[in-house]
Image (cartoon, helix red, strand yellow):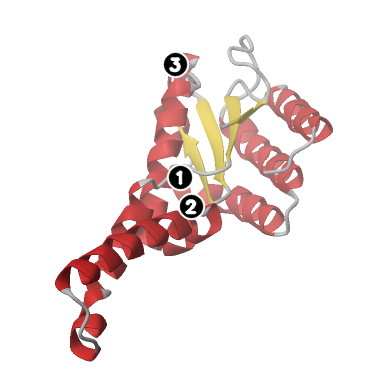
């Protein structure tokens, strides 16, 4: 995950400018990944180790003890290999990664105080890079006024830029589009309740 201090400042400034147009609070979170998927290497290594003895049994006359020792070695080597971050992510089913990223977004919604904003007018903009996942999570006070489909434009801008490696540009574009939507339904006013910054996790 590469985002410079200058990029973080740009995102913070975009949040400040957006919140001048609306009383809603915008919080941005960027995650390198939403889970360490620690069980994945062991699971795949177990599959490989379970399959390893059969060719030895079928095509060799090795003693059983040596076959078992080979099986253990295969498990250890496979687990170490599958623990490499890129391989671990590649071996994790997409459905599981999306579920973990969604759970992380919901956790950040509460952890960062978005749910505690006056009039329930907080919005979380969340990106998890390893899972290639992005989500905009509005609180109930916003969701009652702006339907989920209306956030699609902001989400598309966010995804288009982050796919090209322009993470800060993606956040800035999504913040600006979110401000446009929010200003139509939640006019400016009130105090700035949450820090204007990009959270990294």
Question: Which residue matches tag 2?
Answer: 149
Question: Which residue matches tag 3?
Answer: 116
Q: Is residue 156 left or right of residue 11?
A: left
Classify mark 1: helix, strand or loop.
loop
Residue at point 54%, 45% (across, down): 128
Q: Is residue 69 left or right of residue 106?
A: left
Q: Is residue 156 left or right of residue 161?
A: left
- Tell me whether the residue at label 2 lies in contact with that at label 1, contact meaning CB atoms closer than 8 angstroms: yes
Q: Is residue 92 visible?
A: no
Rendered location of residue 55, percent (x, y) = 25, 84
Q: Is residue 120 visible?
A: yes
Q: Is residue 53 above or below residue 160?
A: below
Residue placed furthest toward the left: 64
Residue placed furthest toward the top: 191
Q: Which quarter of the figure is the C terminus placed in?
A: top right
Q: Real-space Cα distance between discs 2 and 1?
A: 5 Å
- Disc 1 packing (10 Å; few <14; some 14–19; many ≥20): few
Q: Earlier in the sequence, mark 3 or mark 1?
A: 3
Residue at point 51%, 25% (across, down): 122
Classify mark 2: helix, strand or loop.
helix
Residue at point 65%, 20% (across, down): 188
- Tell me whether the residue at label 3 lies in contact with that at label 1, contact meaning CB atoms closer than 8 angstroms: no
Question: Which residue matches tag 1?
Answer: 147
The answer to which of 53 and 171 lies nearer the viewer is 53
Residue at point 65%, 50% (across, down): 158
In the picture, residue 184 is in which quadrant?
Answer: top right
Q: Real-space Cα distance between discs 2 and 3?
A: 24 Å
| Numbered-mark total | 3
Rendered location of residue 174, percent (x, y) = 66, 43
Q: Earlier in the sequence, mark 2 or mark 3?
A: 3
Circle 3 or circle 1, nearest the eye? 3
Circle 2 or circle 3, nearest the eye? 3
């Amino acid at each position: 995950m590469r985002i410079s201090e200058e990029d973080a400042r740009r995102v913070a400034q975009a949040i400040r400018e957006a919140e001048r147009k609306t009383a809603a609070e915008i919080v941005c979170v960027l995650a390198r990944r939403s889970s360490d998927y620690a069980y994945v290497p062991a699971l795949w290594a177990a599959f490989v180790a379970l399959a390893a003895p059969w060719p030895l049994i079928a095509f060799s006359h090795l003693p059983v003890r040596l076959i078992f020792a080979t099986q253990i070695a295969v498990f250890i080597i496979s687990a170490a290999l599958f623990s490499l971050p890129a391989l671990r992510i590649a071996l994790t089913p997409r459905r599981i990664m999306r579920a973990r990223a969604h759970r992380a977004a919901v956790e950040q919604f509460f952890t960062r105080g978005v749910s505690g904003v006056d009039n329930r007018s907080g919005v979380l903009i969340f990106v998890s890079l390893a899972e290639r996942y992005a989500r905009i999570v509005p609180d109930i006070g916003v969701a009652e006024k702006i339907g989920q489909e209306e956030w699609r434009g902001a989400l598309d801008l966010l995804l288009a830029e982050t796919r090209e490696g322009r993470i800060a540009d993606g956040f800035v574009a999504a913040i600006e589009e979110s401000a446009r939507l929010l200003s139509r339904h939640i006019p400016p006013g009130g105090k700035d309740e949450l820090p204007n910054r990009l959270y990294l996790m």
